[in-house]
Amino acid sequence: MNFKIKILSFSVFVAGLCSIIYELLISATASYFLGDGVRQFSILIGIYLFSMGIGAYCSKFFKQMPLAFFISIEFLIGLIGGMSVPLLYFMFIYVSPMVLQIICLAIMFVIGLLTGMEVPLLTFINTDDDYKDNLSNVLSLDYLGGLIATLIFPFILLPFVGLFYSSLLFGIINICLGLWLNLVLIRKRNKTFYFGLMSLIVLLSFVASTGYLLKIWDEKIYKSPVVTNIQTPHQKIVITKRQEDIRLFLNRALQFSSLDEYRYHELLVHVPLSIHSNPKNILILGGGENLASREVLKHSTVNYIDVVDIDEEIFHLAQNDETLLKINQGAANNSKVNLIVDDAFSYLHNNLKLYDVIISDLPDPSNDGLARLYSKQFFMLIKKSLSKNGLFVTQSGEIYYSNNTFSCIKNTVDQVFNHVEVYQTHIPSFGNWGFTIASGEEIDVRNHKELPDQLKFLTDTVFHNSFIFPKDIALQETKINTIDNPVILSYFLDEWEKWRVDLGMN
């Protein structure tokens, strides 16, 4: 294989690597901002492949100057791909979800179009028999680049580099490839070369100012100073603080405000633990910040608490971050609390213990991964892990704007448990929030044990009134949420979009 073929082979490898990285970055960003990861990846991959086909067809019109045009493509795709995520970040603030979706599709179409031209143009550059004999080897490098891209994206780029920096980094790599080819094969500094050089300067300028740009973006999104900002393999964890108001966000979704989180956690925890005659063994699914376990520890009958969360970093923060330690009152470091890093579904599937009370403190079903944690199959696993008179409770979302989502959770739980009740309370940061409590035995909400003394909100009166719903909020008939048919995701996304519009939210 001669020197020129080696250069072209390496170019195919790098081009294939960068192109797949852009596809993954745009799809992941769209999933974060627009929700429904399965839909976003499916549509965007489809657009990407379709536009690649168009690009491959169009490449035949550039046979006369294939190398020059290939280098131009590297500059264009590097600039567009490099700027794609920064553009989407700031468009998220200023445009509607529909416009943002169109922008995602347009960027993906252009990148796919340019990518589709790359390999055919390289085949036009050299028609020597030696090159034709090695064409299969060269093309295999394109697929190898794609494989490496799919491996480094989830294991290196997402957790350690982040979407914003990764986009700029691979744009720079693409442009450097074009500059290198220009110097080695064309060996002259033409207008295309200087365009590539200017594109490189633009991306390097963005890299240098990324910290400042992300700070501006955070302030626009979170409205309060950010004190913790961590990207883990599973989610983006952000903690903000404005005076006494400390807030936790996971993938931009508010999880709690320290000003009123006790309302939510007292209703979530003390209702089932006060109804149960003798709760000893407690399982909390989610709740890695350990605010729910803080409340469970107020019951003297409890022997141990297993807290299962998929993200090890949230446990680390709960045990070591001074901001969270003050709120959870050191619950994560209590000897009765066992922190288990695992997916809730997988844990229940493999679990052999029986629990008296299982508390599901999981995020709302905003994507396909979370939707399965509100499925009939998930609730069946929970039932399997309950003791004979055990109780299960799950947060069930906002009940006015998201009534179909709330109803879907209750109706799905109904398919698994013989006795199901719903209750609610008002949380200023969230609105009217619903809960679903279930058991194989009858649930007597009128007779419960004495509540712990140190509660801020829950009283006997609030306890009983929580089972009374406003006249204008009624349970709806919905489909049953299953793993095979996660209808709750559609309910949630449709209602969330209406909620955003009604409240004038970004």
Image (cartoon, rainbow, N blue to C red):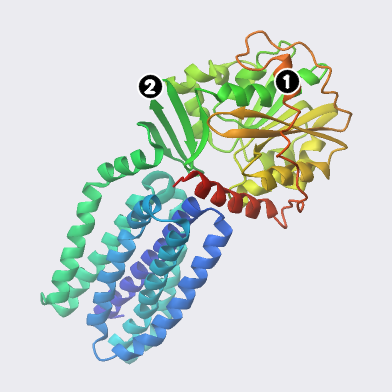
At label 1, which amino acid type do we have? Phe
- Answer whether labels 1 and 2 touch (C-beta < 8 Å): no
- The residue lying toward the viewer, choosing from 454 and 289, is 454
Left or right side of 134 for 349: right
Say which of 19 and 103 sits in front.
103
Q: In which quarter of the image is residue 267?
A: top right
441 on left or right of 126: right
Residue at image position (58%, 59%) is 38
Q: Position of residue 8 (x, y in %)?
A: 30, 77
Q: Check disc 2 and give the amino acid type.
A: Gln
The residue wearing badge 1 is 463
* Residue reaching furthest to the top: 453
Q: Which residue is drawn at 36% across and 40% down?
A: 218
Disc marking residue 206? none
Classify 462 as above or below 315: above
Mark 2, residue position: 243
The one of 427 and 375 positioned closer to us in this rendering: 427
Q: Is mark 1 on a helix, strand or loop?
A: helix
Residue 449, placed above or below residue 41:
above
Q: Give coordinates of residue 80: x percent, y percent.
A: 31, 65
- As drawn, which residue projects farthest toward the front? 471
Residue 388: % across, % down: 87, 28
Q: Is residue 293 above or below residue 23?
A: above
The N terminus is located in which quarter? bottom left
Q: In which quarter of the image is residue 453?
A: top right
Q: Can residue 41 be seen in this view?
A: yes
Residue found 38% across the figure and 56% down from its top = 88
Whole-percent x, y for residue 462 in the image = 70, 19
